[in-house]
Amino acid sequence: MKRIFTLLTCLTPFTFYAQDLVLVTFSNSYKEMAFYKLTEENAVNVANTSWDMAFTAFGTADAGIHLNEAAELNGNELQLFLAPTNNFDNPVNPANLGDRLYNDEISWNYGAFNANRLEVEPDDFGWGIYDPGTGKIEGTTVFVLKFRNGTYKKLQIVSLDQNVYTLKHADLDGANETTLTIDKADYADGKFAFLSLSTGQTLSTVPDEWDLLFTRYAVSFDDGMGGLIYMVTSGTLSGLGVEVAQADGVDPATVEFTDFQDSLSTVLDVIGWDWKTFNLSSGGWSLPDDRAYFVKTANGDVWKIVFQSFGGSSTGNAIFEKTLVGNVSAVENSPVFTTLDVFPNPSSNGASVTFSMKNAGVVKLSLVNLLGQVVWTGKTQATAGFNAVELNGLNVPPGAYFLKLQANGATATVKLSRA
């Protein structure tokens, strides 16, 4: 990496620090994806073919399962379909497959395996339904995976019970049935378990923390005929707890974060794929010279990112300039908390609160009804950075509540609905 250190001053409340030029690569022909943490010099690359499914491991209330949509140039990607039956024992004819399913690139809470869920039903996770009687999610849906080599497997997430995912897959005629388990406790630091079905193993090479993922993924366009799915060969997604604002029509050298902080979004593809365009006349890639991105990480650090060049499929190299703007709080201007969210929301059973803190400390939690009465309390020892905490024992009537977090004299509040 080429490093350029420049001392800058600014009249805003945020101090600009050293600038770095960063090189990340999709590899030639886009064969790899890159996980990048902004405080690090180098990204961690893994082969597109190294994993198939990513399971969330935030806590006990999450059950998101994502599909690896990445593939090299002119290669085939994994394809996920609804099976024509919800009985795993039934044989499946690939000619009768249901809808193809995609990640929606909105949130890491839900992926392609959750795409069929009813959003108005908080107990519905798409692949299964939460059963309050047993306290586990029971699988209700059979899927079919089409692999990059053209072969098929039928697959079912059997359950999520006591923080353990159980899944099974087999050939379409039922042969070679295999059962696998994933314990969330083994992946709490990294927040995701990246599983390869061919090996039955999860990746150990993905870093525990990353802010940006450079990869291929699917995007949808409104073509006036029901929508069009396009496979992006090279795009950028934000990580867990990361927010991004896009600044257009600006001078990237002088643009100020304060002018765009209200545009911060948790949607995963704010940076997306259009930070570069292919020029048909020149046969090369061009980048806008009036665009910058502000990336707020889970611990509240804000970075300005300006893309400088892209090598396309010949190298897969992308170069951008990163500048640390400073550390801000998006939670009631809190000096302690930097992010706060709760899910599922609304919730009819358990829920999880995710938040980020500048420093470690004891956090007091309380649930307050609309009359101002405290109906539940809890306490946790939180670490600096991202935290996920289960809200156990929320035996309160349906309705609207406010969940308050208090630490070191600061308070952060989020609305929670009980269905």
Image (cartoon, grey):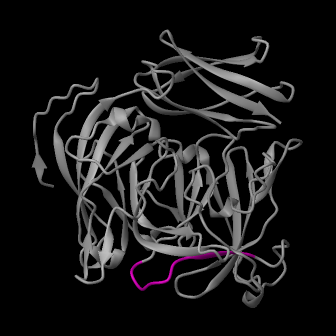
Q: Nearer the viewer, residue 387 or 406?
A: 406
The x, y position of residue 42, in whole percent, is: 25, 53
- The quarter of the picture where the C terminus appears is top right
Q: Where are the magenta residues, as a range?
A: 72-82
Count of numbered circles in the view: 0
Q: Residue at x 27, y 54 (%)?
A: 290
The x, y position of residue 355, in whole percent, is: 53, 31
Q: Is residue 281 left or right of residue 414?
A: left
Q: Nearer the viewer, residue 37 or 172?
A: 37
Q: Is residue 20 left or right of residue 69?
A: left
Q: Residue at x 56, y 70 (%)?
A: 221
Q: Residue at x 33, y 71 (%)?
A: 277
Q: Is residue 313 above or below residue 163?
A: below
Q: Nearer the viewer, residue 122 or 222?
A: 222
Q: Nearer the viewer, residue 401 or 131?
A: 401
Q: Is residue 61 left or right of residue 14?
A: right
Instruction: Identify the image quadrant of residue 394.
Output: top right
Q: Is residue 132 magenta?
A: no
Q: Residue at x 70, y 83 (%)?
A: 171
Q: Is residue 348 above or below residue 307?
A: above
Q: Is residue 323 above or below residue 381?
A: below
Instruction: Identify the image quadrant of residue 172.
Output: bottom right
The x, y position of residue 219, in whole percent, is: 53, 67
